[in-house]
Amino acid sequence: PGGKTFFGAHFYSPSKPLLGRQITTVSANVMVLWGMTLLLMLLLMFDGMRKFVDGISNGLVKIGMRVRFTDPDLPEPSLSRK
């Protein structure tokens, strides 16, 4: 299919366009999986999920919404060892 982009090719297409060349669908799927794996690995390495959640909660607090990620009925965790 001429003029289609990488994500514009239909799902069952036998090949996908990438940088002006046709690659097999299996190769395209493997590239997407490795890309997602690397992205998630970087999020874990640099604590990206915590930063994302903190950013969302800080944004909600700024607009006046109260955010609580713990159950108010549970006791506070104790740091002392018994």
Image: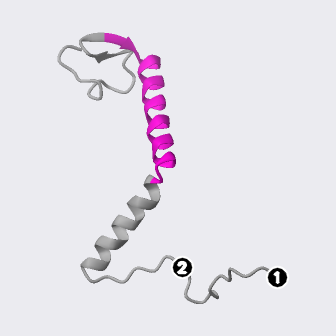
Figure colour scheme: one colour
Q: Residues within 10 Å of mark 1 (few under 14, many from 20)?
A: few
Q: Which image quarter holds the N terminus?
A: top left
Give the prevailing secondary structure in the magenta stretch: helix
Question: Residue 4, how many percent across, how many down?
Answer: 21, 21
Which quadrant of the view contains residue 58? bottom left
Is residue 33 located in the magenta-colored stretch of the structure?
A: yes
Left or right of 74 in this view: 9 = left
Residue with the most extreme top position: 21
Q: Which residue is mark 2?
A: 70
Question: Residue 33, how many percent across, how many down?
Answer: 48, 31
Which quadrant of the view contains residue 35? top left
Left or right of 53 in this view: 7 = left
Q: Residue 49 versus residue 3: which sits nearer the camera? A: 49
Q: Which image quarter holds the C terminus?
A: bottom right
Q: Residue 63 versus residue 51: which sits nearer the camera? A: 51
Q: Which mark is residue 56?
A: none
